[in-house]
Image (cartoon, grey):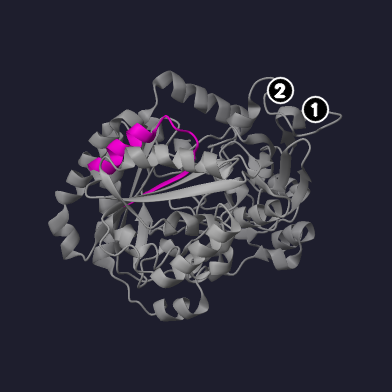
Amino acid sequence: MPDTALPSEGTAVRLAAIVGKEYVITDEAERRVYSNDIFFWGESETADVVVQPGSPEEVSNLVKIANEFDLNISTRGGGMSYTKGYVPAESDCMLIDLRRLNNIREINVTDRYVVVDAGCTWISLADALKEHGLKLDFPAPFSGIYSTVGGAMSQNVPSTMKGILGIEVIRADGSVVRTGSWGRVNPDTPFFRDYGPDLTGLFLGDTGSFGIKTGVSLHISQKMGVTAHGSFAFETYEDMAQTMIELGPYDFVSRRVGLDPFKSQNAAKVGFKEAIKTLGDVTTTGSTLMSGIKDSMKMASAGTNFMDGVKWSLHLTVEAITENAAEAGLEIVRKICLERSREIANIMPRAMEARGFSVRGFLGKDGQRWVPTNSLWPLSRAVEIATAIQDFFHSRRADMDKHGMWESYMTNYGYGYFMCEPSFYWVDEVSEHHLRHLPPEEAKKFRDIPANHDARAYAQKLRFELRDFFHDLGAVHVQLAKFYRYQDALAPETSRLLSDIKGLLDPDRRFNRGNLGL
């Protein structure tokens, strides 16, 4: 490391010349906030400096500065990670916050693509497309109020990534590379992914280990004219899991969300409370204007108590061109679901459609800390996994009760997979990172919750036990980063190929060191 170590005054001037003085953060407390995600990781490194570039060219120049000063680079999007994705693994680190790269560069209706900066939030993109009656052929994450397009590209989401047409990425030498048809010299139109080897796929799910994403091209399509919604209450997780297996062949179900008893009782009062209150938005989600108005009236009369008494619940949306087609699809779904459930008011899937983004669920109702651990399985194993994960928590119930901790589950299925994402909650201090993403009145209320070091230590222990439990059963994961045992799960030949690719693209192992076990 040269004598001029960050954040020296001279280097700060160099960085300010690239991004502007106001976008170079050297204050220690601020650097600590930017260097942590939404889980407690114990002792961890803090970036030496945080920089906020406003263009791909500025990112490229920052990479060249990092090379000059032998700095590691961590890249941060919306900050919603809980797998240590951008938390520095070592000192001598420049953290690049990409949220200023937030432009929507092009919406091409005829050629059916949209090009955005990697720091664009999902809600901004969805709102822009809505004006044109368009939607993404890609499942945006619930945290899309803050989470960014580039972040989801790096982390993967549990569904198809085929809607991604091209990536613009900064390599370790500072050069700018584009993939698919976007990589052509002239014209460089980003409309087609499968132009030669799938270089786009190389950078998906890499958690920023292979390069810094600065732009993305995504496929878009016309919104279906009609949606139909169904909600169903189950007595057991196994019944809901078996129903998901039987619903598996029907791809016309566009949204599939399974909730456990805790989330069934609380999601309407926490994560989607605002959606249910926003009746004007919900009015537009019905099959017709009149049905939308009826849905709004139903929501108003039900308040947020419509899920009282529900245990496991499954919330489904069917899209189609006509109302008859949507209702016919829903009738197929209903017949399968009612073999093991009862139908309940379909307010929740309508609320999700009206306002599909929320981060309020990253804390409990009264500010309890929260952390999820995802796992994906062949759909055929859904019932087996539903039983196994309940047994896991049952065997630890006494210790969890001792620390005032409880678990909850988010469940999904699609394209042959079953997703089980348990979370657990406990009372502990709320971090500054959380507080900045809350409404002011809630931030004020939760700011003084005291630290609970014993419960926190147990939460850390329990989460690693859960990760290892999933590993031993054969799970795969998204959002790998530094948490999941990715290298342990790979065949030696596959692991060597991954290392070879890293060595080619990032020979000094500078980008997001430690992610993917590299």
Q: Is 295 in front, or is 374?
A: 295
Q: Viewer-nearest of labels 1 and 2? A: 2
**Does any portion of residue 158 appear in the rendered image?**
no
Instruction: Kindly state the secondary structure of the residue where label 1 is placed.
Output: loop
The reply to whether dot 1 and dot 2 touch (C-beta < 8 Å) is: yes
The image position of residue 45, as x and y in percent, is 47, 56
Circle number at residue 266: none
The residue under the point 49% across, 66% down is 433
Name the residue beneath numbered marker 1. 184
The image position of residue 358, as x and y in percent, is 50, 61
Name the residue beneath numbered marker 2. 195
The image position of residue 194, as x and y in percent, is 67, 24
Residue interval drawn in magenta: 238-259
The residue under the point 36% across, 60% down is 370
Q: Is 11 in front, or is 287?
A: 287
User: In this rendering, would 150 be left or right of 456?
Assistant: right
Instruction: Name the image quarter holding residue 14.
Output: bottom right
Residue 447 position (above or below residue 173): below
